[in-house]
Image (tube, rainbow, N blue to C red):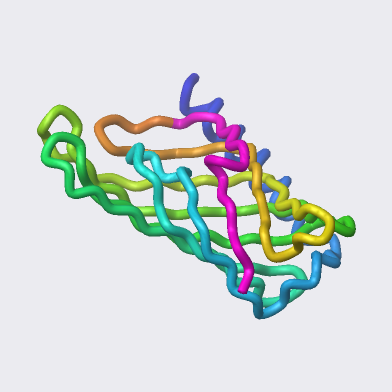
Amino acid sequence: MQKMKMLMMSKVMLAVCLVSFAFGAQALEKTNRLGVGMTNQLKNEFPALSFKIQKSKSFALGGMAGISSSNTDGGHGVGLKFYRNIFDEPQLNFYLSGMGALLSNKISGKRYSGFQFDLGFGSEFHFTGLNSLGFSFEFGLSANKKKDFVFETLGNHFIVAGIHFYL
């Protein structure tokens, strides 16, 4: 029964993705601008440096990397993220995102390695007159494994989802 529910949820998310990619997008003009900043989206419980580059008006590519050398709960995580803008307003754009990451960290002195896959919707907003600073929030679904496999919902406010300064 649990597998049937997960299969149904993945089919619904796939349908939403396909519909979203069918719409044209006119994103806030940041084409070929690099954004650097931070995110807490990795499931290894420490912050990561992140980047985001707007490849076109519709698509952006991002990445994140975090490391901790703590003997008790240290580790690392690296991930890639793809963004598809689906709607924009003057200081705000809405997007569909997908992320894949590799994780490794210690939990109570024992090392665990795993992965994280996120699929979500989000928005990046800019304050008027401060277009170089973007704040993001996101919601969606995550499948991740470190110690145990977990399928969960996401709800990331801008401190977790990311803050980028565009060069």
Q: Which residues are magenta?
A: 151-167
Q: Nearer the viewer, residue 137 or 84?
A: 137
Q: Nearer the viewer, residue 46 or 56?
A: 46
Q: In terms of image quadrants, where is residue 108?
A: top left
**Residue at x 20%, y 43% (from the top left corner):** 74
Report whether 155 appears left or right of 22: left
Report whether 66 appears left or right of 133: left
Looking at the picture, how far across and down is residue 138, in whole percent? Answer: 64, 42
Magenta segment: does it hold 52? no
Q: In terms of image quadrants, where is residue 64?
A: bottom left
**Residue at x 71%, y 52% (from the top left corner):** 124
**Residue at x 53%, y 65% (from the top left corner):** 36
Furthest residue in direction front, as rendered: 129
Quadrant of the snapshot with the C terminus: bottom right
1 w.r.t. 133: above or below: above
**Residue at x 44%, y 54% (from the top left corner):** 100
Looking at the picture, how far across and down is residue 30, in whole percent? Answer: 73, 72
